[in-house]
Amino acid sequence: MNEVTETPPQDPTPAPQPPEPYEPLDWIGEIKGLFWMLAAVLAFHSFIAKPFYIPSISMMPNLLVGDRLVVSKFPYGWNWASASFHVLPRDTWRLLPGTPQYGDIVIVVPRDRTDDLIKRVVALPGDRIAVVNGEIVLNGKKVPQTVEPSVQLPADPQLMCGEYGYPSWCYDVFARYKRRLPSGKDVIELPTYREVLPNGATYLIVRDQPTSLYNNMPEVKVPEGHLFLMGDDRDRSADSRVANSDNGLGGPVPLSDVGGRAEFVTFSLDGSQTNNPASWWKALRPGRSWTSLRPVHLTKGK
């Protein structure tokens, strides 16, 4: 008779393995990685391009409060104003220097402040410029300025600015130009003109105050290495026509204070957004994203 040997039951649970040795976090490596990431961002911000926000009405109708732009840093070379957050001391050196063209929109750092302003180039080194009854006279010749149909901009009732030290409707100074269209939409309908500079660069400007102090300026010569800058909202722009003591640029500005050229609008918000990014979609202004900020140039013979 065959004997049957019983096999003891096997435990299906594998034996526990010893834990892998714990590797502590390499804090030095993490800090180095963070440092190089920040260095790359700052280098791009300083040498290639940076974002810019429009906080005032001085460049209307072409730039609106709430526009977000891209400013390129390399078209005119690099200088102290190119560096992120203006960490370099103000100086006159320029690396691979270039000169803007008539009509370019540039970023400039006023000589008595550290905040960036955005203005348009209307006179180049060596030019003579005057303003007579609101019209530019460049090298003894009037810059053509023709009446255009009034531009209509959304009224944006929730758009707030702080130029007076407290929040107020950005278009408060344009309240008399507020209109309601048959569709029921409220717009600001501004007196509009078109300028054409000597190189054919053309753009729209706003002029609505015939008695503005800025409408007349005696002729000045732009020194070598300088530019004369003006805002497109001619009656409300503290630019090269305005003294430093009145928050203006105090005359022609050195090219070494120009930090870049405005290229295009990335997106624009109408002021109805909150701190919640989810509200930004509804606040987007249609049709402004990716709008070029380079001036149109008329061809010869037109």
Image (cartoon, rainbow, N blue to C red):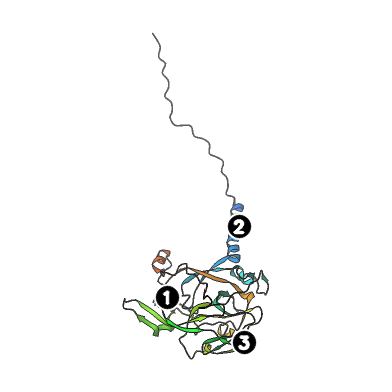
Q: Which residue is mark 3?
A: 220
Label 1 crowd (10 A; few <14 / some 14-19 / many >=20): some
Closer to the camera: disc 3 or disc 1? Answer: 3
- Please tell me in which quadrant of the rendered image residue 113 appears: bottom right
Closer to the camera: disc 2 or disc 3? Answer: 3
Among the two numbered marks 2 and 3 on one chain, the one whose residue lies closer to the N terminus: 2
- Please tell me in which quadrant of the rendered image residue 189 appears: bottom left
Give left or right: position of 39 versus 268. Answer: right
Separation of marks 2 and 1 at Cα, in angstroms: 38 Å
Number of numbered discs overlaid on the protein picture: 3
Rendering coords of residue 195 (x, y %): 51, 81
Mark 3 lies on a secondary structure that is strand
Q: Which residue is mark 2?
A: 36
Residue depicted at 62% across the width and 87% down the height: 220
Can you tell which mark lies on residue 159? 1
Q: Residue furthest bottom?
A: 211
Q: Nearer the viewer, residue 2 or 176?
A: 176
Q: Which kind of residue does numbered mark 1 sit on?
A: Leu
- Please tell me in which quadrant of the rendered image residue 130 appears: bottom right
Give left or right: position of 186 versus 109. Answer: left
Rendering coords of residue 17 (x, y %): 51, 35
Q: Which kind of residue does numbered mark 3 sit on?
A: Val
